[in-house]
Image: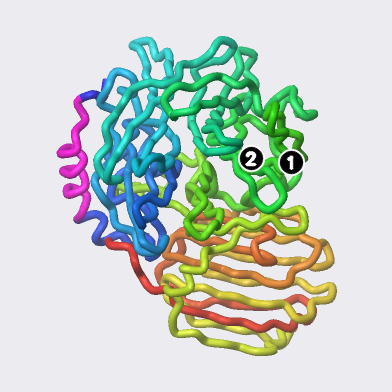
């Protein structure tokens, strides 16, 4: 049991780790990361009393999945974040083995937080409870205990409540596993956020033509964007198929239409949200401007935390840059929020650059930088961008985009992720000290990965097989995260 965990214990652990943090060259400049321990899923993403709040799964006591608290940071602009005291601790009978993922909504000028309480008995058997906590100021939370228990027909893998308002009711989507070990997203309905009624399956195995599509679905998120209803979800147990489903667990979306009277969901096929190595458990919110904004975990379950170099300094993982979502031409686009531009400085431009066998372009860069390039002319050519130990490649003949990085376990080995891409019009590269986010064609495809480069690498090299004409911009990215 972890019900003796206190905020004082968390603070002492943070203080103890400061000497290691201070000398870690892989600390990120503009991404949220833990001051100590392991960070994973973003939770409770919400705008409350003039500030953005993001919570996240956090084990401050080790670089592995153990004690799970809700870490908490706030911001006025989605860019400058302030860490505030831990919001939820596993200190009650119904969450003693972890305050697992969930969401937050604002109602009657109070912040309602919903999360999964994880409980294990001495034999390791799991129980899960959907729990409620309420805050008047966004900092201090009063736990109200379980509001939903696992219904008949489902295992204790029943978690990650995402609450939203639709059709004059409150709704909750939950990730679930049936007793037959099939993944689903289920629905609950409420008039007051306290009393919830099971409303059946939204979609999952055996629905909408899906068959053997994962043994568990995690972290659902349902919202309307443009003229489509979008369900984000993370299925577990899907085997790799060509370039698809290469990570151990997947993160993607279904687009379709919800019939409001029955809440049935007619949807298209599953589409991956991110093609990189390190992206999972995204959560969205709609802000005061009406934008749909996403933040994801810059990690995935397959990597043992000991493989990450930062584990030696007492911390692992981070969150992505906040991204605005748009629905356009049948595709979910994601791109850094406009506020990110305030961090860009020292712009350098290279117009009408011609790359061929005799000509290349080399840029001197800092530890955190951004590069944006537009492709003016690319006929049966191959673009190669070398960033320290990583490579970005687009082959216009094969119509394949590739990202390569050094393996965490063997720096002599390269590993790759790919996607089909009919044309390439532009690339935005956000490189932080130990991360890279690549946005293609204004967010049509995205690759998110952690990278741990040699300290001496200070150049970005553009070369071509064939001839390519580019416009290139490069910026330094100002540091906003404390050590």
Q: Secondary structure at mark 2?
A: strand
The residue sitting at 40% across, 40% down in the picture is 107
Mark on residue 256? 1
Q: Position of residue 174 (x, y in %)?
A: 54, 29
Q: Residue, x 51% and y 77% (percent of image)?
A: 459
- The magenta-colored residue range is 4-18
Q: Nearer the viewer, residue 192 or 461?
A: 192
Q: Position of residue 96 (x, y in %)?
A: 30, 23
User: What residue appears at the point 54 percent right and 26 percent down from the top-left corner?
Assistant: 189
Residue 73 falls within the magenta-colored stretch: no
Give residue 396's position: percent from left, percent from top: 80, 68
Pointers 1 and 2 in contact (C-beta within 8 Å): yes
- Quadrant of the image for the C terminus? bottom left
Residue 363 visible to the viewer: yes
Q: First in sequence: mark 1 or mark 2?
A: 2
Front residue of 80/246: it is: 80
In the rendered structure, find residue 231 and report the number of the disc placed on it: 2
Q: Is residue 98 left or right of residue 258?
A: left
């Amino acid at each position: 049991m972890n019900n003796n965990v206190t905020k004082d214990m968390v603070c002492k652990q943070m203080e103890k780790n400061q000497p290691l943090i201070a000398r870690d060259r892989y600390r990120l400049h503009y991404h949220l990361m833990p001051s100590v321990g392991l960070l994973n899923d973003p939770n409770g993403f919400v705008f409350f009393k003039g500030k953005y709040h993001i919570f996240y799964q956090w084990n401050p006591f080790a670089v592995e999945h153990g004690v799970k608290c809700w870490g908490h940071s706030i911001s006025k602009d989605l860019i400058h974040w302030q860490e505030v005291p831990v919001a939820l601790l596993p200190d009650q009978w119904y969450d003693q083995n972890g305050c697992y993922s969930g969401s937050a909504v604002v109602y009657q000028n109070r912040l309602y937080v919903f999360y999964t309480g994880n409980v294990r008995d001495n034999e390791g058997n799991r129980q899960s409870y959907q729990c409620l906590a309420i805050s008047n100021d966004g900092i201090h939370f009063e736990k109200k205990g379980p509001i939903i228990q696992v219904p008949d027909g489902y295992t204790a893998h029943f978690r990650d409540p995402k609450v939203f308002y639709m059709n004059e009711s409150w709704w909750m989507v939950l990730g679930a596993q049936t007793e037959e070990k099939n993944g689903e997203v289920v629905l609950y309905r409420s008039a007051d956020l306290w009393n919830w009624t099971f409303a059946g399956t939204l979609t999952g195995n055996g629905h909408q033509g899906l068959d053997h599509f994962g043994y568990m679905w995690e972290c659902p998120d349902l919202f309307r964007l443009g003229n489509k209803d979008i369900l984000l979800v993370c299925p577990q147990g899907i085997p790799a198929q060509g370039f698809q489903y290469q990570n151990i667990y997947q993160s993607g979306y279904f687009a379709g239409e919800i019939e409001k009277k029955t809440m049935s969901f007619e949807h298209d096929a599953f589409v991956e949200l991110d093609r990189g190595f390190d992206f999972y458990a995204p959560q969205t919110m709609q802000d005061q401007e009406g934008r749909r904004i996403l933040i994801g975990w810059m990690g995935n379950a397959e990597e043992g935390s000991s493989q990450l170099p930062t584990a030696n300094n007492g911390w692992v993982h981070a969150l992505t840059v906040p991204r605005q979502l748009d629905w356009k031409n049948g595709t979910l686009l994601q791109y850094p929020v406009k506020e990110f531009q305030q961090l860009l400085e020292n712009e350098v431009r290279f117009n009408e650059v011609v790359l061929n066998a005799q000509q290349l372009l080399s840029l001197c860069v800092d530890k955190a930088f951004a590069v944006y390039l537009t492709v003016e002319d690319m006929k049966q050519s191959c673009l190669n961008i070398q960033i320290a130990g990583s490579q970005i490649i687009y082959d216009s003949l094969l119509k394949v985009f590739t990202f390569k990085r050094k393996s965490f376990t063997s720096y002599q080995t390269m590993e790759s992720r790919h996607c089909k891409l009919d044309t390439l019009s532009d690339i935005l590269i956000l490189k932080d000290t130990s991360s890279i986010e690549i946005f293609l064609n204004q967010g049509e495809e995205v690759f998110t990965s952690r990278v741990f480069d040699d300290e001496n690498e200070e150049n970005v090299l553009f070369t071509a097989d064939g001839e390519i004409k580019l416009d290139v911009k490069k910026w330094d990215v100002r540091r906003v995260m404390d050590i």
